[in-house]
Image (spheres, grey):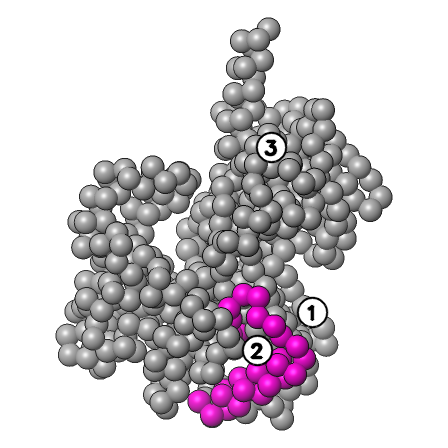
């Protein structure tokens, strides 16, 4: 593979994608400098540590453990060197708004018994569904995700089409349509579709191929890294620094400009020329706010026409006393969640009867809360770009906390001793790694292929490194032809 010795590369943003790219590029020989505007690395995978409470402000699900192992093994490490990993059981608990409740066990056989209790024959159907999901996962990972097959023509490959047909997957069928082939009970369909909430999709607009996430959930398992996702961030940072990456926190980049040879990265105190720049931030932000107008072959107006992933309303709560009614991951779901998805994707509005997620990591890891307390994070998916004046947030906060009390039997409101509130906005759905029309500028992270989620961002750093190697090799061949 092409050696990058002598290449100077700046990375703007130290999220998982940026840190992964720093590790891979450093390992390839490049001189890497990472600029991070925040106090801590991690990007959206941030942390709040205050008054004895510790919160992961971003991702909280540790899925696809083999991809974390793959990352660390590439640099002679294993995850256990950086954090203790615990498999959760149950995977999660669900409270439905009709008063029903279920804990989804880690053992697939026990999950089949749960499904059978809701619908005759559903246990065997779940086994069939998971076999299909496993094959989908293996095809998707081996043929698309790991090799970074992001061009539209890749999806016309006969092997993918044959694999999909062999699985009984209609390439244009939605997830809900696919799940309905197996389960009549709407609650069972929710149990195999809920992960779409965290992938930025809806069961009514997401392709059936995403049934592969049920293999991730039910077969591969749900895990927790002690110390939270922050411990994983710290491990990836350590690896990047071992590969020679220099990380500068609290150093926001204010400008990226094309130069005669390379690209100039500007901060409040410095301007430095690099051979290449990798942006671990939304491409819309880079192209509208950091680059000169016309620097890329893409109009700023283009971003207005894009489909945006859902945003989220979030509460970070320190709760006095224990919360035995909750598991590490808990979902509160209406029996009919279609109106909530409509309020996200079709008719943007604050939802009247939302689905939401409550993460209580202190049920597994007592170190993230003071003695006699629990750490709880509440997340409600929302349409992007909603107006959220203070009175709207206050009304919605009361709606959610009242709903938790009604549907779980636990009232947080008189037990909150620490609170932070946040509305998270998102960018358009993902784009390619190369910036169009501007040599030397690349994108990495959840806004690019292969997509959102920590494992995908780790792969994104590997993929962008492969692309830079390819571009460097092509430049070398061109120079040889011209000399």
For label 3, the SS is loop
**Mark 2 or mark 1, which is nearer the start of the sequence?**
1
> What stretch of residues is rendered in magenta?
378-407
Which residue corresponds to the image point at 25% horizontal and 65% vertical from the top-left?
Answer: 177
Report the Cα–Cα distance between label 2 and label 3: 44 Å
Q: CA distance from mark 1 to mark 2?
A: 13 Å
User: Which residue is rendered at x = 68% and y = 38% of the image?
Assistant: 10
Q: What residue sits right under mark 1 in the picture?
A: 49
Seen from the viewer's position, the closer of residues 98 and 414 is 98
* Spatial separation of the CA atoms under disc 1 and disc 3: 40 Å
Q: Is residue 181 visible?
A: yes
Q: Looking at this rendering, what residue extends furthest in the top direction?
A: 483
Question: To which residue does mark 2 refer?
Answer: 376
Q: Quadrant of the C terminus?
A: top right
Secondary structure beneath label 1: strand
Whether residue 462 appears in this view of the structure is no
Indicate the position of residue 200 as horizontal and vertical percent values.
Answer: 45, 62
Q: Which mark is residue 438?
A: 3
* Viewer-nearest residue: 66 or 173: 173
Mark 1 or mark 3: name the one nearer the start of the chain.
1
The image position of residue 388, as x and y in percent, is: 62, 75
The image shows residue 236, relative to residue 383, as above or below, that is above
């Amino acid at each position: 593979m092409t050696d990058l010795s002598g290449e100077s590369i700046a990375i703007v943003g130290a999220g998982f994608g940026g840190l992964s790219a720093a590790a891979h590029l450093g390992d390839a020989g490049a001189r890497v400098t990472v600029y991070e505007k925040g106090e801590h690395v991690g990007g959206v995978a941030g942390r709040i540590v205050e008054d004895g409470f510790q919160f992961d402000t971003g991702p909280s699900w540790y899925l696809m453990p083999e991809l974390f192992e793959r990352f660390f093994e590439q640099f002679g490490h294993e995850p256990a060197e950086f954090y203790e990993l615990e498999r959760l059981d149950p995977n999660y608990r669900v409270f439905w708004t009709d008063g029903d409740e279920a804990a989804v066990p880690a053992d697939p056989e026990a999950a089949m018994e749960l499904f059978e209790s809701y619908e005759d024959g559903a246990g065997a159907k779940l086994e069939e569904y998971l076999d299909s999901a496993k094959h989908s996962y293996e095809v998707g990972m081996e043929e698309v995700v790991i090799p970074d097959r992001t061009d539209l023509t890749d999806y016309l490959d006969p092997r993918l089409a044959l694999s999909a047909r062999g699985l009984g997957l209609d390439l244009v069928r939605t997830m809900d349509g696919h799940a309905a082939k197996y389960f009549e009970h709407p609650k069972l369909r929710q149990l195999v579709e809920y992960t779409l909430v965290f992938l930025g999709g809806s069961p009514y607009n997401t392709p059936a191929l995403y049934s592969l996430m049920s293999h991730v959930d039910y077969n591969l398992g749900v895990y927790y890294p002690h110390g939270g996702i922050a411990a994983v961030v710290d491990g990836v940072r350590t690896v990047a620094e071992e590969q020679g990456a220099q990380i500068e926190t609290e150093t926001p980049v204010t400008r990226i400009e094309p130069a005669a040879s390379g690209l100039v990265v500007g901060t409040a105190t410095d301007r430095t020329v690099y051979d290449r720049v990798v942006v671990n931030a939304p491409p819309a932000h880079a192209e509208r706010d950091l680059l000169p107008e016309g620097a890329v072959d893409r109009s700023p107006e283009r971003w207005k026409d894009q489909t945006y992933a859902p945003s989220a309303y979030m509460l970070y709560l320190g709760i006095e006393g224990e919360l035995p009614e909750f598991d590490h991951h808990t979902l509160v779901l209406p029996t009919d969640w279609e109106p909530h998805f409509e309020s996200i994707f079709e008719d943007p509005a604050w939802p009247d009867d939302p689905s939401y997620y409550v993460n209580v990591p202190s049920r597994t890891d007592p170190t993230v809360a003071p003695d006699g307390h629990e750490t709880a994070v509440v997340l409600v998916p929302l349409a992007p770009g909603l107006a959220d004046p203070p009175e709207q947030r206050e009304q919605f906060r009361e709606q959610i906390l009242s709903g938790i009390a009604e549907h779980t039997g636990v009232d947080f409101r008189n037990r909150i001793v620490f609170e932070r509130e946040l509305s998270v906005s998102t960018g358009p759905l993902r784009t390619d790694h190369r910036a169009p029309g501007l040599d030397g500028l690349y994108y990495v992270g959840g806004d690019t292929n292969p997509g959102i989620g920590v494992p995908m961002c780790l792969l994104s750093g590997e993929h962008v490194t492969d692309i830079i190697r390819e571009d460097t090799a092509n430049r070398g061949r061109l120079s040889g032809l011209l000399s």
